Image (tube, rainbow, N blue to C red):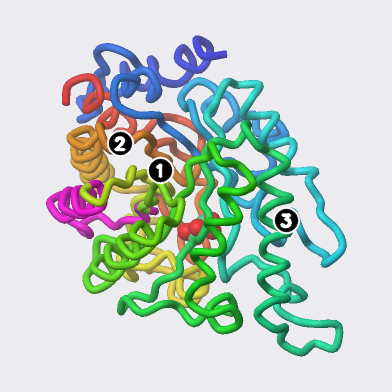
Amino acid sequence: MKNQFLLTNVIPLAIAGLMAGCVIEKATGPVTLKDAYKNYFLIGVAVNQRQINDQDQRGDPIIKAQFNSISPENALKWDAVHPRPDGYDFTEADRYVEFGEKNQMTIVGHTLVWHSQTPSWLFQDQDGKTVARDVLLARMRDHIHTVVGRYKGRIKIWDVVNEALNQNGTLRQSPWEKIIGPDYLEKAFQYAHEADPDAILRYNDYSLEDEPKRSAAIALMKKLLAEGVPITAIGLQEHVHMKWPSAEREDETISAFAKLGLKVMITEMDVNVLGGLRTAEISEMARQGGSNIYTNGLPPAVDRELAKRYADLFGVFIKHHDDIPLVTLWGVTDEDSWLNTRAQNYPLLFDRAGKPKPAYFAVIKTGNHP
Ligand code: GLA
């Protein structure tokens, strides 16, 4: 499968790029992402339902050839595994974990406690009234124990709490915070640790490079660690733009979290080439989107700029490889990306036909010659 992928995609494109005088760099050394980075960190990818079920003829060979870790785009979110108060549905989640095991990949669990993609019953009683703190805590505990317990020893890394902070650094007034209070974070980590004491437990959020959110996240992590909360890693989602954040700021941010003794993971990387809003807030993205300026493909100059952007950021990740065990991309091809919601975007390493882009070759080259 791997050789077939290389023969049909990578090698012809590299040759075509060279013949056309493009800036596509010929890869020297290993030509898969996971091999090029084997001395630094795992390379993960978010997989969707078709891919988990081996139904994506374009994406699946890429996943198997290039990546050694997976995250589930949706299969483990609350609304997918626990749609009814009295019922779990593990159909997709089981397939996801089997897919990872079959392909010898490090399997990530995403995500246990989040304000989005939760069913409405979760925060209400039978009469539609908001539940009390102890009821919600019991539901949270049951969910975490059931889901984490089911995959104990198989899912090695869990996003326990996702996106608890606002951009201004205050705690998000999510139903979790409003009903339970700020200690919902402590409880979530405690329950996850009880369910699988060996799992790596992450706090995951976006735009942690920005002040004042960064300082607030550092303070929050310090507080949790001082209280003995079993948190072992921070996830920088890395939904970045062409110019934001700068490589220097990324570098400082990784250092700041690593200094706390946490592992730092890049959890949802993509590069929005359309600019605009600096947020991973799904509701905001859907509302504002970005201007649809590249409907006929990405101009070669922008494609080269994207390649440089990826190379710069991967250079920073390599610099911190002692603290970074995993870098995950949020999707396989440009077609798969959530960033296409309102406008055609080009945020990933493989184009809509599944061909590696200049950004792919730039990342490979950085891995081989940092
Ligand atoms: C957030 C979530 C992800 C995903 C992206 C957008 O970053 O953590 O699960 O939903 O938004 O797709």
Q: CA distance from mark 3 to mark 2?
A: 33 Å
Q: Earlier in the sequence, mark 3 or mark 2?
A: 3
Q: Which residue is mark 2?
A: 359
**Relative vertical location of residue 279 with respect to residue 312 in this rendering, above or below:** below
Q: Amino acid at mark 2?
A: Ala
Rendered residue at 43%/42% (across/down): 329
Disc ID at residue 348: 1
Residue that carries the numbered disc 3 in the rendered image: 80
Q: Going by the image, does 149 lie left or right of 33?
A: right
Residue closest to the eye, 236 or 291:
236
Label 1: few (<14), some (14–19) or many (≥20) C-alpha neighbours in 10 Å: many
Q: Secondary structure at mark 1?
A: loop
Q: Nearer the viewer, residue 338 or 164?
A: 164
Does residue 20 appear in this view? no
From which residue to which does the magenta span run? 237-258
Quadrant containing the N terminus is top right
The image shows residue 107, relative to residue 14, as above or below, that is: below
Q: Is residue 66 left or right of residue 170?
A: right
